[in-house]
Image (tube, rainbow, N blue to C red):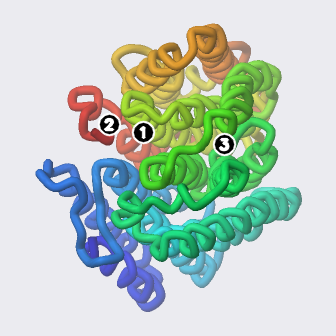
Amino acid sequence: MLKMIIPMILLLPTITLCKSKQFWPTALAHSFWIALLSLQWFKPSMELMIFSNCYLGVDQISVPFLILSCWLTPMMIMAGQNNLITEPTSRKRTIIFITILLQISLILAFSTTELIMFFIAFESTLLPTLVIITRWGGQMERLNAGTYFLFYTLIGSLPLLVALLTTQTYSGTLSICTLQLSTYPDMMNPWTHTMWWLALFTAFMIKMPLYGLHLWLPKAHVEAPIAGSMILAAVLLKLGGYGIIRMTMTLAPPLKMLSYPFMMLALWGVIMTGFICLRQTDLKSLIAYSSVGHMGLVIAATLTQTEWACTGAITLMIAHGLTSSMLFCLANTNYERTNSRTLLLARNMQLLLPLMGLWWFSASLTNMALPPTINLMGELTIIISLFNWSNTTILMTGLGTLMAAAYTLYMLIITQWGETPSHTKTIPPTHTREHLLMMLHMLPMVLLMMQPELIQGT
């Protein structure tokens, strides 16, 4: 574990001290080396959890998220290069420094075995993300987006802290391993137990986000620079899902009555975000709302608390992390050439950028969960587990997947076909860097189709 954290921490002084000409190659090479080193966590182990010390450890649930975080670091550095060409060197250093700080927080959050340390790492992701959105965002609305993001996150974090301190008071420990042996819920009355779980759930539901608590997400995504959008979509949303899975596995199960309202909102959100996406004119906003729909399926799955559902939830989260990050990168390539996120102003891009059209097609197929993608494996597992939990859920999940296919096709057809607008007749060609970026998104998805058990958390 420490052989990932220490190189990541040492990358901070490296970025600060290296010469301006060697800045990008050094940051990229170092982060790629860490990403490749993280792949060894896939090596099968006979132990349930591998500890590096009493505070840090990895198991089959945290490994996929850790590798995804490490894999995304070089891609974020690569994606943001074009945006930062005109910026002075000091600002380039600052954004990479903040990005690495964010990655360190995420690695600590996914690998800690102490719940209070998880809370600290969970909350420490807030400040770097806020700085990335409010300082390097596209328009003046970025300040409004940052305010939404800050207050939604803070409102959820206080109940989570209170719930964790209550657990410490009743059980005397917050270690994941020790809590599983504790009998502290017997000391609580049913009302206290329900309120305690509600406080635990709130922070994670906002982070996911649950439909109804999702208003910060489209704003943050639309205003964030490409690096911010990638990390938000790929890893930060997954912190919520990981938190729910970890808490429900470690602590005493919540009462059934508490799960029902969250389950209803999550499944309703899958359908509603589908309809919202069909009405969007902003490309980044469309991709952001599609994330809310996919995370609704994940929330519904984690609340059923079955092994089958948790497997599907982890698989879908990893699949969605790679797919949505790729879609944001594609949206950014359009934005850099047309200076607009409006769908109608970037039509017939297939004719102008043919190879980019292939990447759009591939990303759209994975977002639709077409066979044999890992998105399909995750969604099917979740739909089956929800059907076993309640037969009527098939109506909502079925309609949700239909809507997902409809808005993905709508996005693909609008951007790739149609009449070419007059202002886009002469646009710059694509760069090798952009194709490498898309390749690094597609390669893990293709390889995981052949061996999906690596990310199924079993």
**How far apart are the two marked residues, 1 and 2, measured between alpha carbons?**
6 Å
**How far apart are the two marked residues, 3 and 2, measured between alpha carbons?**
39 Å
The nearer-to-camera label among 3 and 2 is 2
Q: Is residue 340 above or below residue 345?
A: below
Residue under numbered circle 3:
337
Which callout, 1 or 2, points at the residue further toward the start of the chain? 1
Q: Is residue 53 left or right of residue 111?
A: left
Q: Quadrant of residue 337?
A: top right
Q: Are marks 1 and 2 in contact (CB under 8 Å)?
A: yes
Residue under numbered circle 2:
456
Which callout, 3 or 1, points at the residue further toward the start of the chain? 1
Please name the amino acid that badge 1 sits on: Ile
Q: Is residue 106 left or right of residue 120?
A: left
**How far apart are the two marked residues, 3 and 1, measured between alpha carbons?**
35 Å
Q: Of helix, strand and loop, which one carries label 3? A: helix
Instruction: Tell me residue 259's x, y (percent).
Output: 65, 35
Q: Is residue 97 left or right of residue 9?
A: right
Q: Quadrant of the N terminus?
A: bottom left
Residue under numbered circle 1:
314
Q: Is residue 424 left or right of residue 332?
A: right
Q: Is residue 150 above or below residue 425?
A: below
